[in-house]
């Protein structure tokens, strides 16, 4: 198959010389990075084009946003296979702080403490190339997180499915080799059979087609209708939601030619797979949202080739009125489906690759009817370099005004420093943006969180150029609130579900140090009733509200039937006595959120006092 690139103007292209692989004070120049699409015989390969830049770019509003102490971290990268889809922030060691977790295409799964110290057991070497970010969750309900990673070879072969525990050790039954084939995208972690454990859904590239597989936490593979054969090579990460309200999870996935919607038994839903004339799909994914306010969910995704655009379909495969929204150039950008301006209706954020030079339409915000919102698209007006956004766009309410700030990658660099954009809900630049990390931020996008528990936001992002990459961690400020991070990471949460509100409903932050304190936050709809429970032992107890994962004999009630306020957040602060005898004690927490006669248990979370 021929190599196809997401570029719209034919130009002479060249690989940068070795002298250009790191920023230099002299010889300033521009560069733009593009990637082969997923039908290529060498998918995901990078090509860098030098661009003459007549004048420097304007600085970002006279405000400097610094990186955290100990950052950035220089790491390695494969010469032509760069990292995709960014970074995960999660508490591996149960101390209340978040670790910075990612993979690098020189063959490592990486994790650091927020001060830049490597997390215990990391980095972990991989046999093949981990191009996509890992997914992270507690797969078996024991209170410890697992890291799930796909890998690939330089071409179409040699991938594995890797599962590590929180100390970087292989979970029994892994790694799994799937026919010596390349695995595409981030794994999806979802409980498909309602047994309290999360299954792992991954895509195998078996050119000229592909397969979707489901694995248990012990490495055993589902049979029956699984694996599901696709009509062409896999082109996205899988995502999941209960689209029709029947209580069962469906899986959405893009092959190169088609959009699939699949039930938990591996049966393709009526109306799918669907094709769009002259459109193809690469690197994107499906986001979900109730666009027409009828109580069920629609599917949103982007296309490229001769019909680039953003699309919205009902779960029966019919087109949503007002869609598609046509683009002028290709898009590899996964959509974000959330309410950016607090008007009570969902919006869709998406990027495009942009023009080669000149002011470029980098990203846009659409209302639920498929129309551009006022102030959009965002045009990089200083952008003599052109370019656009193809990575994961993320959102959070930094200033507490109820509207979301929006952050995105870019596929150009000036003097070998890239761009990370930050804008408000009306598309205006935030003070201090764009950020300027070394190398390209392309195809990654930022991740937002509070890594050190100090109550404000940090932004993590990968940047790279050929054999070099950097893990960047910026201190943004703002007042952190778990419920304000509407879409803080690729596909909304570390399990990669692709649905606003689809992440953890119980969040812990603060400190596990004796004499300190931690904050537990239960998330849900305002007016719902929240219960918060503590135990020192885990269990697995079926209830009408799902699985209770903490033990009855040691259970203590911290809050019972407390109504969630208008913010949708119920916070409980726990103060740890300075008693050395408590050091090493692990406390497990789980919430229950009830609304009328329905309800569900939250995720389990844990802290180990020290």
Image: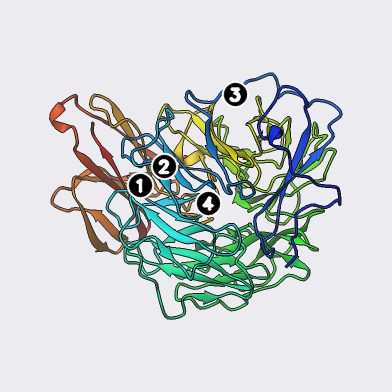
Residue 549: give x, y in percent of width and height.
Answer: 26, 55
The answer to whether any part of residue 423 appears in the image is: no
Other residues around mark 4 within 10 Å, as few (<14) / some (14–19) / many (≥20): many
Do labels 4 and 2 touch, CB within 8 Å? no
Q: Earlier in the sequence, mark 2 or mark 3?
A: 3
How far apart marks 3 and 4 lie (CA) works out to 28 Å
What residue does disc 2 label?
Answer: 123
Near mark 2 (Cα within 10 A), the count class, few <14, some 14-19 or many ≥20, is: many
* Front position among marks 3 and 4: 3
Q: Could you tell me how far apart the alpha carbons at marks 1 and 2 are, in whole angstroms?
A: 8 Å
* Depth check, front residue: 218 or 494: 218
| Residue extending farthest top | 62
CA gap, disc 1 to disc 4? 30 Å
Residue for badge 1: 168
Q: Quadrant of the N terminus?
A: bottom right
**Secondary structure category for the residue under label 2:** loop
Q: How far is the residue under mark 2 from the one under mark 3?
A: 28 Å
């Amino acid at each position: 198959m021929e190599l196809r690139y997401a570029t719209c103007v034919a130009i002479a292209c060249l690989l940068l010389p070795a002298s250009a692989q790191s920023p230099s004070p002299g010889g300033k120049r521009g560069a733009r990075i593009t990637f082969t699409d997923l039908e290529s015989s060498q998918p995901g390969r990078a090509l860098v084009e030098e661009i003459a830049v007549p004048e420097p770019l304007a600085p970002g509003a006279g405000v400097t946003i610094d990186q955290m102490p100990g950052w950035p971290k220089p790491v390695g990268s494969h010469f032509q296979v760069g990292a995709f889809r960014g970074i995960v922030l999660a508490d591996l060691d149960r101390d209340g702080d978040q670790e910075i977790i990612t993979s690098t295409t020189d063959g490592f799964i990486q994790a650091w403490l927020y001060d830049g110290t490597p997390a215990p057991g990391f980095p972990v070497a991989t046999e093949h190339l981990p191009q996509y970010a890992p997914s992270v969750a507690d797969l078996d309900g024991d209170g410890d997180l697992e890291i799930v990673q796909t890998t690939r070879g330089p071409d179409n072969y040699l991938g594995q499915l890797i599962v590590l525990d929180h100390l970087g050790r292989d979970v029994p039954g892994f790694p799994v080799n799937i026919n010596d084939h390349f695995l595409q995208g981030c794994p999806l972690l979802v409980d498909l059979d309602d047994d309290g454990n999360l299954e792992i859904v991954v895509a195998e590239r078996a050119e000229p087609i592909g397969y979707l597989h489901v694995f248990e936490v012990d490495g055993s593979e589902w049979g029956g209708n699984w694996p599901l054969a696709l009509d062409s090579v896999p082109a996205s990460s899988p995502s999941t939601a209960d689209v029709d309200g029947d209580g069962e999870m469906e899986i959405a996935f893009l092959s190169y030619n088609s959009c699939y919607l699949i039930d938990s038994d591996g049966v393709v839903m009526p109306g799918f797979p669907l094709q769009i004339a002259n459109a193809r799909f690469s690197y994107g994914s499906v986001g979900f949202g109730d666009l027409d306010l009828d109580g069920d969910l629609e599917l949103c995704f982007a296309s490229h080739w001769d019909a680039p655009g953003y699309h919205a379909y009902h779960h029966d495969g019919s087109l949503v009125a007002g869609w598609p929204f046509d683009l002028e150039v290709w898009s590899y950008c996964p959509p974000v489906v959330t309410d950016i301006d607090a008007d009570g209706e969902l919006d869709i954020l998406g990027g495009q690759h942009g023009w080669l030079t000149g002011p470029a339409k980098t990203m846009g915000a659409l209302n639920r009817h498929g129309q551009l919102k006022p102030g959009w698209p965002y045009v990089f007006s200083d952008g003599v370099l052109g370019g656009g956004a193809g990575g994961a766009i993320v959102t959070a309410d930094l200033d507490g005004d109820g509207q979301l700030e929006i952050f995105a990658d870019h596929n150009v660099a000036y003097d070998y420093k890239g761009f990370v954009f930050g804008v408000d809900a009306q598309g205006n630049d935030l003070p201090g943006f764009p950020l300027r990390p070394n190398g390209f931020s392309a195809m990654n996008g930022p991740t937002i969180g509070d890594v050190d528990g100090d109550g404000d936001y940090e932004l993590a992002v990968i940047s790279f150029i050929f054999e070099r990459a950097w893990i960047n961690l910026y201190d943004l400020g703002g007042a952190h609130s778990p419920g304000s991070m509407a879409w803080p990471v690729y596909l909304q949460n570390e399990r990669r579900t692709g649905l606003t509100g689809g992440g953890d409903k119980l969040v812990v932050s603060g400190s596990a140090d004796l004499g300190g304190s931690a904050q537990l936050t239960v998330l849900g709809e305002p007016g719902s009733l929240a219960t918060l429970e503590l135990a020192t032992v885990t269990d697995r107890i079926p209830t009408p509200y799902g699985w209770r994962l903490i033990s009855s004999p040691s259970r203590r009630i911290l809050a019972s039937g407390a109504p969630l306020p208008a913010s949708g957040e119920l916070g409980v602060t726990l103060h740890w006595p300075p008693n050395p005898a408590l050091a090493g004690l692990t406390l497990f927490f789980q919430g229950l959120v009830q609304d009328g006669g329905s309800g569900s248990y939250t995720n389990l979370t844990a802290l180990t006092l020290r």
